[in-house]
Amino acid sequence: MNDIAEASHRGRRTLYTYFNSKYDIYKAVIESELEVLYAKLEEVLSRDIPADEKLILMAFTRLAAIKEVVTRNGTLRADFFRDIWQVENVRKEFDRKEIHYLETILQDGIDKGIFQLKDTRQTAAILHYAFKGLEVPTIRGVMRLDYSRKEDREIVSGVLFKGIYAKQ
């Protein structure tokens, strides 16, 4: 709390007026950063592009945004890798919202004849967790996906829309 008080140019007593613990401050930082993520994802959601393109853009946007958030917050980065369960607890609402965003895109694709799905909700959840699985390798720099590179977009869209089966 001393370090936080010093960095924010506030007294510890002032911090305790607003926050009960370091965890409460940590949670407030994560929630604030999640608002930034929501704004970026909602921007993608509002774009007037076909659902398949929107889905790819959503994947790249969320990975870049999450990497940016974690990299920008050095302590958050350390905590992200040290206590993933704590991060998971804080971001439950983000996960629910993102699944809803993905459902919206998928339903738009179904309505326009781009996608054919049996279970939109389940598909959205699977996509969410697949994207989530790419977060740590992206944050660590092991996976360097870039939306501006056509090859990267083609690989991601190929896996998402065509799978890995040989052409029949």
Image (tube, grey):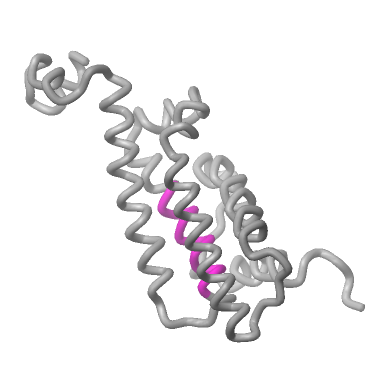
Q: Position of residue 77 (x, y in %)?
A: 41, 32
Q: Where, quadrant-wise, is the C terminus in this rendering?
A: bottom right
Question: Residue 67's x, y, as percent?
Answer: 44, 46
**Residue drawn at the location 54% of the way across and 45% of the way down:** 135
Please indicate whether residue 116 sits to the left or right of residue 70 in the image.
Answer: right
The magenta span reads 54-66
Residue found at the far right of this picture: 168
* Location of residue 9 (image quadrant): top left
In the picture shown, does residue 29 fall above or below 107?
above
Residue 58 forms part of the magenta stretch? yes
Residue drawn at 21 percent across, 15 percent down = 1
- Asked if residue 130 lies left or right of residue 16, the reply is right
Q: Is residue 155 left or right of residue 108?
A: right
Q: Relative to residue 166, is residue 124 depicted above or below?
A: above
Picture coordinates of residue 75 (x, y %)? 35, 28
Residue at image point 11% right, 21% down: 17
Q: How many marks?
A: 0
Residue sitting nearer the eye, 117 or 87? 117
Image location of residue 45, percent across then percent down: 43, 70
Q: Residue furthest bottom?
A: 112
Secondary structure, magenta segment, majority class: helix
**Residue pictured at 62% horizontal, 78% vertical:** 110
State whether residue 114 is above or below residue 3.
Answer: below
Q: Is residue 135 above or below residue 153?
A: above
- Asked if the magenta segment contains residue 127, the reply would be no
- Relative to 155, is 13 on the left or the right? left
